[in-house]
Amino acid sequence: MTALAPYACQPDQSRGRLFPEKLSTFRSPWQRDRDRIIHSSAFRRLKHKTQVFVEHDGEAWRGDYFRTRLTHTIEVAQVARTIAGALNLNTDLAETVALAHDLGHPPFGHTGEDALAVLMEPHGGFDHNAQALRIITRLERHYADYDGLNLTWESLEGIAKHNGPLVGTSPTGGPVTGPLPYALAEVNAAWDLELHSNASAEAQVAAVADDVAYNHHDLHDGLRAELFTEAELSDLPVIGPAFAEVDALYPGLDPTRRRYEALRRVFGVMVEDVIAVAQNRLAGLQPRHVDEIRAMDGPIIRFSKPLYQNIKAIKSFLFQRMYRAPSVVVERESVTRMVNDLFPHYLAHPEAMPDQWHQAARALNDETERARLVLDYVSGMTDRYAIAEHQRLFRR
């Protein structure tokens, strides 16, 4: 087994857990964190939460192949382990952050998040990253001694800051403005996550792995949904050359195999670029401890500038042809109406929620606290449960 780099998070130097526990005899702190996430209720619900396409979209045979929030998360974890391993970082911590990074997503993906953010404006807003922290520190209630999963400081830090500092200066160099999401502020008040600094290299790996995974699989899903064709991708950087390489090596290849061969090359270009850039920067900077990574003026794990510009072009194409495709926009409008119906209904009629949620709402006199409780309920829904609830309440 290769020794961890000096700037990696070392298991024997973890800052521990908010509620102290005995060390495991056979698992590292981050292996335990990873396993707690996998066994959580929120992780299981990702199976029926949207990535881009709502679960019932399209013909059954085609929709079964689209990514869900769960399959996306698994792909991110795989990429994170690969990159972290190549850099001699702690693969268990990178995987833990990757597996937890989307736990706070509501039903209907970013469309559901946008709708809830507007509805929650009077009550502290909504942010899926902050909600992930709320879930793992408060809402998962399986253990006798505490609420939440009692993850290590490093895991909480990574989930909070994998996209960069949250106070002070952003990764792009500009100031971070606006108040902290209340869910994040509550966790940080209980345990200082040093929100002014970068996260560990492992958490930064998880963030880049997220970009790699969704840029890769959204191309797959967009092609399967017939929102664009391979021919329309041929002018895009990275993608066009990948298809040309496959055509040169395998002339006349079956179209499905051709697609997979090309897009796995795109995937490889992104992963190899991140690894090469990080290896070069780490060799030049020679950090000796994870805190030196946290103190840097920007992320150590990132794409090269040329590839970043190419990825921007790919994202622009996907934005126009996939995320804003007419069929997707119609679906976004439909599910936004569902969220806009459900949230105020539960707020006005808490008895419409299951008994444990109803009783908890009745015990709250503060309107903001009640709204946050309703938010916890609605944001925890799967797509299909939200659709079923909307049918039950509004389409009798």
Image (spheres, rainbow, N blue to C red):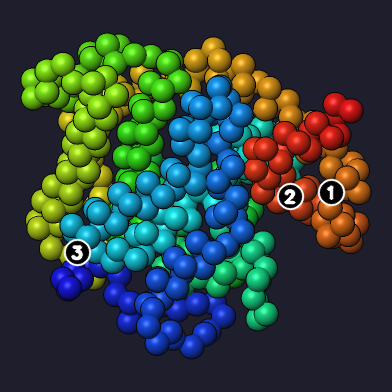
Work out how far the residue at label 1 is from the one at label 3, CA to CA, in angstroms.
48 Å
CB atoms of marks 1 and 3 within 8 Å: no
* Residue nearer the viewer, 201 or 70: 70
Q: Nearer the viewer, residue 48 or 91?
A: 48
Disc 2 to disc 3, C-alpha distance:
40 Å
Q: Could you say where residue 46 lies in the image, as x and y percent from the top left?
A: 56, 47
Which tag, 1 or 3, sits closer to the chain's start?
3
Quadrant position of the N terminus in the picture? bottom left
- 36 versus 247 height, above or below: below
What element does badge 2 sit on? helix
Which amino acid type corresponds to the residue marked 3 in the rendered image? Asn
Q: Which residue is mark 2?
A: 377
- The quarter of the image holding the C terminus is top right
- Disc 1 marks a residue whose amino acid type is Met
From the viewer's perspective, tell me whether residue 147 is left or right of residue 278. right
| Residue underneath mark 1 | 353
* Residue 153, horizontal then vertical, whole percent: 46, 70
The kind of secondary structure element at disc 3 is loop
Q: Residue at x 16, y 71 (%)?
A: 2
Number of numbered discs overlaid on the protein picture: 3
| Disc nearer the start of the sequence (1/2) | 1
